[in-house]
Image: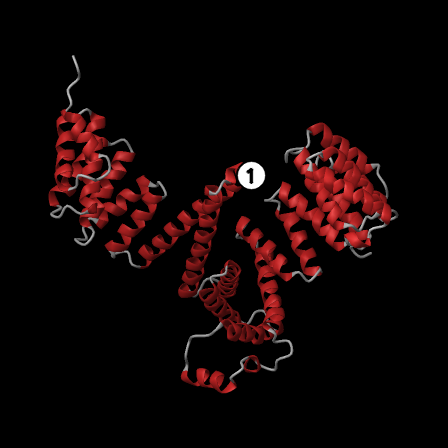
Amino acid sequence: MATVSEKELPDKARALWTKAKSAAELKNYGYAISLLQNVLKEAPAFLDGRRMLRAAAVAQTDGKRGSGLMSSLSSVSLRSGANVKKDPAAAMDQAERLLDSDPYNVAANTMLKEAAMAAGLVETAIFALETISKGSPKDTKVLHELGDLYLASENTEKALEIFNRIAEINPSDLTALKRAKDTAAQQTLKQGGWETAKSYRDLIKDKDEAKALEQKGRTFKDVATIDAQLGELSQQYEANPQHVDVVRSIAQLMELKYEQTSNADDLAGAVQWYAYCDQLLGGSDPALARKHSDLRLKQLDKSIRAFEEWFAAGGDAHPEAEQYREQLSAMRMEREAANIGEARKRVERNPTDLQLRYELAERMIAAGQFTDAIPELQRARQNPNVRLKAISLLGRCYSEKGMRDLAVQQYKTAVSEMVAMDGNKKDTLYRLALLHEGMGNTAEYVECLKELYEADYGYLDVAQRVEASYSTPKA
């Protein structure tokens, strides 16, 4: 059974559809739902009507999940409901009547999906899984099924998006990584136009230029050339998925393509191919492992920025805002852990490099790991290039741990050795002032602020604090 459009609706269903649209526009969702259920009973393959019905149900329930009673009733009804295979249309109708008060109900949407598949309505089955995933965005089992259905319907773009999402939720899901990699290759095959080309040179208008580029060893490649070469490599990969050199070349080309396009999917593809190559090599190539880590961090940074911009634009009003905040928090934690992990590996490879120990401590402090940062900073302050910064950060660590006397000592040492009133000295002086204030050392507090005041009147709130210290209470 094929999906039908509005123009293909029977007369009775089309009249009901017109009324339903008007009711939905007037926000009379209950009436719209009743009309749309009748439309779908007449035309089960009318996907646009089903989408509007779900949107009306979500609006009517304000996006809330069904109560425990509703879930229990749904389960009982589904167990005793119509036989999905014998009468899929009746099963879909029954599922919709359950979904009008609980649009994200997993059992009802599953029933709708199975009935749609029995009726040959793959797009409707996809829609049912999409609805479940909106209600449970971290359910990777549902996402895997959705990605597979997208692939079956040859929607590689959507499939890649889903498998990338699974990999973000669970970076250790090797099945998702492989599916994403294979889907990216399949998408390249479709988009690159290499199915009919004998080689990537056939896809370049100026074949002489292509040959010259190869001979001169030039590294710049436009997107068309990259896609074409990816096409050739994809054929080799299909012949032998364990070929390390082929996988490495695909990863490098995906990275190069990302540099040309700045497309998030290209970056995700590069990350996944490097991850697979690292897996094939068993982590034996440090440079490749570092490349994978760097690109993963870049991917995390892009995702984090996207989430932050979304929240800044009013994302808190979204019904799933809390779940997205949890996802954003998890990404930030992963980024911090990855930063620390990479810095730690560099220290392990070069244990006598005190600059690397300072960089490790910086990342630990950014992640709030003040205790772990202290021994690294104590070693790092022996390096004259970072000595003063390390001492200042030591003061911060002691302060964060409530060891204020030790913090004051470190800050004083750093300030006494700092010659220029640069950003580091200003920050250290200001932190020292606040420590004195918290300890009740008023004279020392004001003395630090005055030194800042004389050097930079506009630094933070120093001017207000200094001038306030001169005011006397009114009698």
Residue found at the far top of this picture: 475
Q: Position of residue 304 (x, y in %)?
A: 45, 48
* Up-down relation of residue 327 to residue 261 (above or below): above
- Residue drawn at x 41%, y 51% is 338
Q: Residues within 10 Å of mark 1 (few under 14, many from 20)?
A: few
SS type, badge 1: loop
Give the percent coordinates (x, y) of residue 251. 49, 67
The C terminus: image quadrant? top left
Relative horizontal placement of residue 421, taking residue 60 as reference (left or right): left
Single out the residue that lies furthest toward the bottom.
208
The answer to which of 202 and 53 lies nearer the viewer is: 53
Q: Is residue 190 above or below residue 441?
A: below
Furthest residue to the right?
86
Q: Residue at x 62, y 67 (%)?
A: 186
Residue 455 place in picture, x, y as percent: 13, 41
Seen in the picture, residue 60 relative to 191 is either above or below; the reply is: above
Residue drawn at (79%, 54%) of the image: 7
Q: Which residue occupies the foreground of this view, 161 or 85?
A: 161
Image location of residue 3, percent across then percent down = 78, 55
Foreground pick, 321 / 50: 50
Count of numbered marks:
1
**Which residue is denoted by mark 1 in the rendering?**
318
Quadrant of image for the N terminus: bottom right
Is any atom of residue 419 visible in this view? Answer: yes
Residue 407 is at least partly visible in this image: no
Say left or right for 449 vs 173: left
Q: Which one is in front, 433 or 352? A: 433
